[in-house]
Amino acid sequence: MSLSFSIAATDGVSRLGTIRTPHTDIETPVFMPVGTLGSVKSIPQHILEELGVQILLGNTYHLYLRPGHEAIGEMGGLHRFMSWERSILTDSGGFQVFSLSELRKVTEQGVEFRSHLDGSSHFFTPERSIEIQIALGADIIMAFDECTEHPASRERAQASMAMTTRWARRSKEYFETHKNEVPWAASRSGSQSLFGIVQGSMYSDLRRESAERLVEMDFPGYAIGGLSVGEPRELTREIIATTLPLLPKDKPRYVMGVGYPEEIVEYAAMGVDMMDCVLPTRAARHGLLFTSEGRMNIKNARFARDNQPPDGNCTCLVCSRYTRAYLRHLFVSREPLAAVLNSIHNLAHYLDTMRSVRHAIRLGELQAKLSGAARASEQTS
């Protein structure tokens, strides 16, 4: 068994569903914490389980550089290596290579780049990316793509989209030929699933062309990539809104690299099933907490003698035990525990947010709640 997707309820265009992978059933809409190097920064796996994390995202580029996909394969794959029995998704490495703008060269064959660790030279092709991801053994893997910068000219975006489409076909062909060749995965033959990634920068017609050509290839799921690269949030929403209807309704739809808590709620209401972002832990390391009352900069002096929990409406292990004063003390003292506790709370907030979204869809109330919140915001602005 590889992957299946079913929809249990809808509210407008939003969907309550289940993605079934070889490891777990995932309730959607789902937020996926980013575990770049096989680790969600500052949070051990048993805490992730207690928080209710259903699926993690691992990074192909970083895991390829260290400890290496061969080493992870020899250890039985990424699940066994990091002691995680729930689902995993790995990205293609395309976004990380894109971020190495001064250290890469893109051709039709692939991308030559230099390691950010030691400057050594490497070459990623669609086939190489899939080879690495097969060795890592994630439940869901991604076709190799090029993520364009913002802003990008139409000519640049069109050429990149066309190449990404050709790379998607090469990724799929390699995957179909080699997906059962990893010795340690013999007992899980055919257990991985490959998703395609829609590109096209901020041009709706290019996004349409990309989506239509990928749908013809019949992937089991589709991602919308190339967002959160510096474009205005209004444009992000516009691209998501115009692209989602182009993707099959009976397959998972994944928006990559988004967003703030209020944004993931909005995207779920638009019909997105899967989202990931580094914000919960990255913001935590800078002292920014997400709460039911908005964002909180815990390093502010006004919290020095504040005995309230970070969020009085949160029941996570941090809010149940610690005060704002203590969290501020840890942060300004540069205690490593500050990043741990802040990260746990932020991730709990994201996961609780998605639970609330799923509950609202089940009751048929999500669209009405968002409409009411929008009207209230207009009245106070």
Image (cartoon, rainbow, N blue to C red):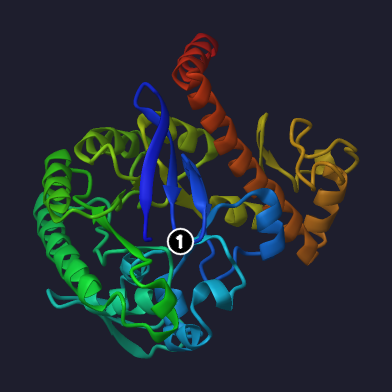
Q: Which residue occupies the foreground of this view, 249 or 107? A: 249
Relative to residue 225, is residue 213 drawn left or right?
Answer: left
Secondary-structure class at tag 1:
loop
> Does residue 137 appear anywhere in the picture?
yes
Residue at left offset 32%, top offset 78%? 103
Residue 345 vertical placement versus 14 (above, below): below
Residue at left offset 33%, top offset 71%? 97
The number of numbered badges drawn on the structure is 1
Q: Quadrant of the N terminus?
A: bottom left
Residue at left offset 39%, top offset 29%? 14
Relative to residue 15, is residue 355 drawn left or right?
Answer: right
* Quadrant position of residue 231: top left
Q: Position of residue 130 (x, y in %)?
A: 29, 74
Q: Position of residue 74 (x, y in %)?
A: 48, 88
Q: Residues within 10 Å of mark 1 (few under 14, many from 20)?
A: some
Residue that carries the numbered disc 1 in the rendered image? 22
